[in-house]
Image (cartoon, helix red, strand yellow):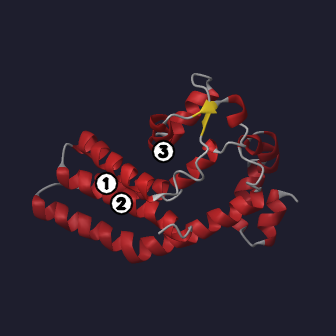
Amino acid sequence: MSIIKYIAESNHFLIVFCLENMSFDELYHKKIGKLLPKHARPEKIIEEVSEHLSSYKQMIFYVLGPLLFFYFGMGIFVGEYSGGAALFALFISFYSSFLPEADLMLTPKGFLARRGRVAKPYEKYFILFFAPFYLYLIATKKMRPVFSNEYKPFHRLRAFFLYAFFLFVLGLILYASLFKAFFFMLFGAIGYATHLVVDKVI
């Protein structure tokens, strides 16, 4: 079935408009589909993305929205302007809410794995922390693909806590402020945890 036809039948009109204008069917079957394991059918991907988007919208309304205002208010109280930092933290939370799915790149039966080798522990978490950069290295052939025999390694509490710690350290580097680093970590951790809740990991 055409990916666009499937989405149209599911009434995702905005997504249909975007995909039609990007020739997504052709792009998926010729490029994207080859990078994913066989069980990652486009229909399943769309359903999962829709489910996570719905959960994230609720998280924005009930948690992240009020937390954003609290962040602004606390910034004024402690004498640290946090407008730009708060908006960037919100973006990080959205990015983090899909990040656990990066373990699709590590599946042993994927297209990348057939050209790669078993990942060392530090390489696995390098992909978690720098997923877009890893894709760039693979695309430019500056790094061999790696795979893991561990099932969904990023859908685990260990990965969650390591990622939260990474965000805190990154926040310190970016802002040189414990206050901003904490909220940077908190927003990202909430996004990541939202994904794990939807997938019934926590």
Q: Position of residue 84 (x, y in %)?
A: 30, 52
What whole-number distance in Å separates the C-alpha atoms at marks 3 and 2? 17 Å
Q: Secondary structure at mark 2?
A: helix
Residue position for label 2: 187
- Disc with the residue nearer the chain's start (1 vs 3): 3
The reply to whether the C-beta atoms of the residues labelled 1 and 2 are less than 8 Å apart is yes
At x 73% / y 54%, what residue is drawn?
40
Observer-side mark, 1 or 3, equals 3
- Disc with the residue nearer the chain's start (3 vs 2): 3
Q: Based on the displayed image, in which of its 4 quarters is residue 15 positioned?
A: bottom right
- The residue under label 1 is which amino acid type? Phe
In the rendered view, tell whether residue 52 sits above or below residue 188. Answer: below
> 86 and 21: which one is in front?
86
Q: Is residue 112 visible?
A: no
Check the picture and name the quadrant holding the N terminus: bottom right
- The residue under label 3 is which amino acid type? Leu
Residue position for label 1: 184
Residue position for label 3: 128
Q: Position of residue 29 (x, y in %)?
A: 81, 45
